Amino acid sequence: MTLIAGSYEKFIWGFSLKTQKNKSASEENPNLNTKTIALNSLFSYPSHTAPIKTLAVSGPVAVSGGGDECIKIYDLVTSSEIGSVLTTATTTSLAFYSPSDLSFPRNLVAGTDSGTVEIYDADPFVHLKSVKVHKRAVADVAVHRSGRLALSVGRDGRLAMVNLLNGRRTFCSRLDKEAGLVKYGLGGSAGKDMFFMGVEQKVYVHDSEDARILMEFEARSKVLCIAPGENGLIFTGGEDRCVTAWDTSSGKLAYCIENAHNARVKGVVVLGSKKVGSDTPYLIASASSDGVIRVWDVRMAASSQTQIPVAETETKSRLTCLAGSSEKGREFGWLLHLFKF
């Protein structure tokens, strides 16, 4: 499992999460948790010449975008930067399309401050199409799991849909209020295809088929990040310094990690799995502008009033974004020659 964080100071941070056996466990106590989580540093260096605004991770590859009109590409297996793509505008949002049958992403979709959505082929990394979608900057982009569609929200107060197969905007609608976040995911008790929009302190849950609002959740302050989880849960973080889980099956608050950080939460990543037989706990990670990254076992967070992170690290920088992957890097044969710049 890998976490990547970007900062206002232009630094990129890489960490690996590893489970380790607890030496205090004994055979006489089979129910005792025999594993602990270690957050180990992989790399840290100034990768951009302007603040990093966005990150995306898929399997063994990560990308970062900032105000220097450049997208940097990283190989997480070797913990190295392997190339970059020059852009004509500041990259504000990044999202991969990763087919389940491949060990590396097929496409990268980027939003820019000029209102365009840029489509890239990730094998090799080449630019395919630029689509003018918004009149102002793109705030966020999300790619559907089919790889056919992408959603974007912009500073012009609109929601738009882009057909990734022909590179055209197919839908655009004015919102009542400007949205800053959009994410695809599965929700409800039946795992229904949904998308989630963050509008100030609210999160709206929409049906992906007809875009109708199914429910809404209201946080105590502005929501700055959204991460869809499993079993109908979505996680949010924001200016209230908490990490909150919402249940799309019941339409209610599931639980909240109070005061998860000392400053606003800028990123939340779902790591582990609840599936039977998984060798890792169900983990989420959060990053804050206070420079701290924390990892939580939500099974403990949901059942206890005292919520303590299972791992944490201090970067001593103002973190702006967080991305991660629960895949194990050694399982992938990442081929550098796939990227031809």
Image (cartoon, rainbow, N blue to C red):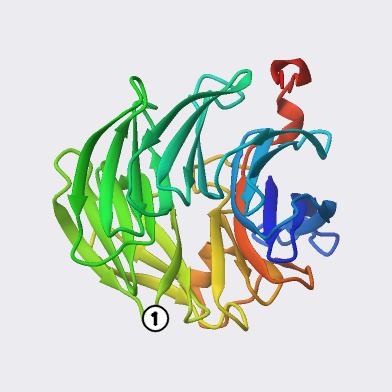
Q: How many marks?
A: 1
Instruction: Check disc 1: other Cα within 10 Å, few if <14, some if 14-19, many if 20+.
Output: some
The quadrant the N terminus occupies is top right
Q: Is residue 182 above or below residue 167?
A: below
Q: Quadrant of residue 167?
A: top left
Kindly identify the residue that appears in the image at 61 percent across and 23 percent down: 103
Instruction: Give the side of residue 143 with respect to residue 161, left or right.
Output: right
> Where residue 233 appears, x then y in whole percent?
37, 57
Instruction: Give the side of residue 235 with respect to residue 72, left or right.
Output: left
Q: Is residue 53 above or below residue 110?
A: below
The residue that label 1 is drawn on is: 221
Identify the secondary structure beneath mark 1: loop
Q: Is residue 205 visible?
A: yes
Kindly identify the residue that appears in the image at 38 percent across and 61 percent down: 180
Q: Quadrant of residue 157?
A: bottom left
Identify which residue, 27 or 214, lies in the foreground. Answer: 214
Kindly identify the residue that appears in the image at 55 percent across and 55 percent down: 269
Instruction: Give the side of residue 334 with respect to residue 196, left or right.
Output: right
Q: Is residue 295 visible?
A: no
Q: Is residue 165 above or below residue 137?
A: above
Instruction: Give the side of residue 151 with respect to residue 42, left or right.
Output: left
> Where residue 245 appears, x then y in whole percent?
41, 66
Q: Is residue 63 above or below residue 303?
A: above
The quadrant the C terminus occupies is top right
The amino acid sitting under disc 1 is Ser
> Where residue 326 appears, x then y in whole percent?
62, 43
